[in-house]
Amino acid sequence: MAVSSIEATAGSSSANSYLTIADGDILAEDRLGTLNWTTASADDQARALLAATARLDELQWVGSRATTTQALAWPRLDASCCEKSYDSETIPAEVQAATFDLAELLLGNAGAFSTVAQVTGELVPGIPNANLSSASLGNGALSLSFKNSTAPVYLNALNVLPSLRQLLGCLCLSKPASSIGSIAVLRA
């Protein structure tokens, strides 16, 4: 089944992407490591752009929506950061670049957004610690922090692609999702 068409008109009530496939192709030409994008079919590129845009729209942004009828979070009114103001009729280049980067990642790893953060190894070798999130030793005490195993961590775009935090800078008010856990301190 073919994906519906990409609508990347800023402020449109039917917009579903921050980037067109053609604009994605231009970004891919200027970047290293875009094999996922350049080898994907147009249909898969469109799916990745739609998914990336949807994930970016889950984040909190500076300013407010430019109109009440626009489908996406951008463009925005009163959006400024780092002494730069953003036009209320266009999508910032940073948001477009983030859309491409996230789409590139999704083309290579469609399961990048799982609803639960996965632990991929032992933090402390030899000790069963699948729910251990950190360990530190100081002042004769071993401190262990455990993830809350009953509450799944919903990953946002900043968890899945940490470089987005720097790319988006102060435009994005969201923080990476984290789990809430307990802390145990063992003294010698």
Image (tube, grey):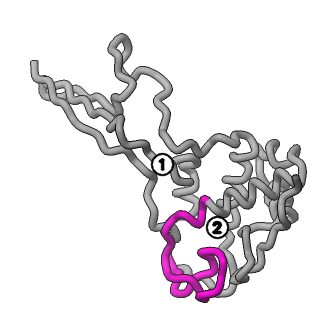
In screen coordinates, is 173 left or right of 148? right
User: Would you place residue 99 above or below residue 134 in this image?
Assistant: below
Residue depicted at 49% across the width and 68% down the height: 60
Secondary structure of the magenta portion, mostly?
loop
User: Would you place residue 91 above or below residue 102 in this image?
Assistant: below
Task: Where is residue 46? Give x, y as percent.
Answer: 81, 58
Per the image, label 1 sits on a secondary structure element best described as loop
Residue 73 magenta-highlighted: yes
Give the residue type at disc 1. Answer: Tyr
Task: Where is residue 80? Give x, y as percent.
Answer: 52, 80
Q: Are marks 2 and 1 in contact (CB under 8 Å)?
A: no
Per the image, label 2 sits on a secondary structure element best described as helix
Residue depicted at 29% across the width and 28% down the height: 135
| Residue 108 found in image quarter | top right
Query: Which labelled disc corresponds to residue 154?
Result: 1
Give the Cα separation between the discs numbered 2 and 1. 22 Å
| Residue 75 found in image quarter | bottom right
Task: Where is residue 14? Give x, y as percent.
Answer: 74, 78
Q: Earlier in the sequence, mark 2 or mark 1?
A: 2
The residue where tag 2 is placed is 95
In screen coordinates, is 57 left or right of 37? left
- CA neighbours of label 1 inside 10 A, class few (<14), some (14 to 19), many (20+): some
Q: How many marks?
A: 2
